[in-house]
């Protein structure tokens, strides 16, 4: 049986839903945000405060696969000389899959995503593909049958990044 391919329209709607959801959750918590449309700086949302602190957020959303996102290969390799320090870069992974709870938002520092991808691909190595999969419930490739091997989510302690907007090192606006 052939699996149906996800349409570009559905992908685009999921992407937008993820970006709006993250922006909404941030503003509900008192953060100032700016949505970035187009290819201006390569990040979807800027979070900033009155002290000139800025966090750069890339939002990845899935509506098809529980706790599994496709990321560009650049997230597996810290770019030396990047004008934005790695400590200011974050990947918000939004899980929009059908469930009885609200969508989940993981606010991962870029370094944690890099560590998770390196862990998943440790045995097989990275391919020449322009994208890689971050799958929290998966064990590393080539080690799926080893009982004591942690899943990617366990390895990076994903649960501590669930709705953890405090890790952005940006102060909410005082109410």
Image: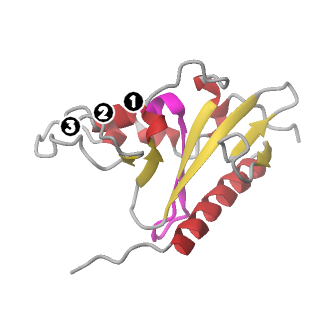
Distance of label 1 from label 3 (alpha carbons): 15 Å
Q: Is residue 161 left or right of residue 131?
A: right
Image point 33% across, 38% down: which residue?
Answer: 154
**Which numbered disc, 1 or 3, marks the residue closer to the eye?**
3
Q: Secondary structure at mark 3?
A: loop
Residue 104, label in figure: none
Q: Which residues are magenta?
A: 94-114
Residue 119, label in figure: 2
Residue 124, label in figure: 3
Q: Is residue 107 left or right of residue 170?
A: left
Q: Position of residue 75 (x, y in %)?
A: 47, 36
Mark 2 nearby-residue class (10 Å; few <14, some 14–19, many ≥20) = many
Q: Is residue 151 left or right of residue 52?
A: left
First of labels 3, 2 by sequence position: 2
How many numbered marks, from 0 up?
Answer: 3
Q: Name the quarter where the N terminus is drawn.
A: bottom left
Are the residues flagged by discs 2 and 1 in contact, CB closer than 8 Å? yes
Q: Position of residue 51 (x, y in %)?
A: 85, 24
Q: Secondary structure at mark 2?
A: helix
Q: Quadrant of residue 143?
A: top left
**Closer-to-camera residue (160/168):** 168
Distance of label 3 from label 2 (alpha carbons): 10 Å
Mark 3 nearby-residue class (10 Å; few <14, some 14–19, many ≥20) = few
Furthest-front residue in this view: 128
Mark 1 nearby-residue class (10 Å; few <14, some 14–19, many ≥20) = some
Residue 115, label in figure: 1
Q: Name the quarter where the C terminus is drawn.
A: top right
**Which numbered disc, 3 or 2, marks the residue closer to the eye?**
3
First of labels 1, 3 by sequence position: 1
Q: Quadrant of residue 171?
A: top right
């Amino acid at each position: 049986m052939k699996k149906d391919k996800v349409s570009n329209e559905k992908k685009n709607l999921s992407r937008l839903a993820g970006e709006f959801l993250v922006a909404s959750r941030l503003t509900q918590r008192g953060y100032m945000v700016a949505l970035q449309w187009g290819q201006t700086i390569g990040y979807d949302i800027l979070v900033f405060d009155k002290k000139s602190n800025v966090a750069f957020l890339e939002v990845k959303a899935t509506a098809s696969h529980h706790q599994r996102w496709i990321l560009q290969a650049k997230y597996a390799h810290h770019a030396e000389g990047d004008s934005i320090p790695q400590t200011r870069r974050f990947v918000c992974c939004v899980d929009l899959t059908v469930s009885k709870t609200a969508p989940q938002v993981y606010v991962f520092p870029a370094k944690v995503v890099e560590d998770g991808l390196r862990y998943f691909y440790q045995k097989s190595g990275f391919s020449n593909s322009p994208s890689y999969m971050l799958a929290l419930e998966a064990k590393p490739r080539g080690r799926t049958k080893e009982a004591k091997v942690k899943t990617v989510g366990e390895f990076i302690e994903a649960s501590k990044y669930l709705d953890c907007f405090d890790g952005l090192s940006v102060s909410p606006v005082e109410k």
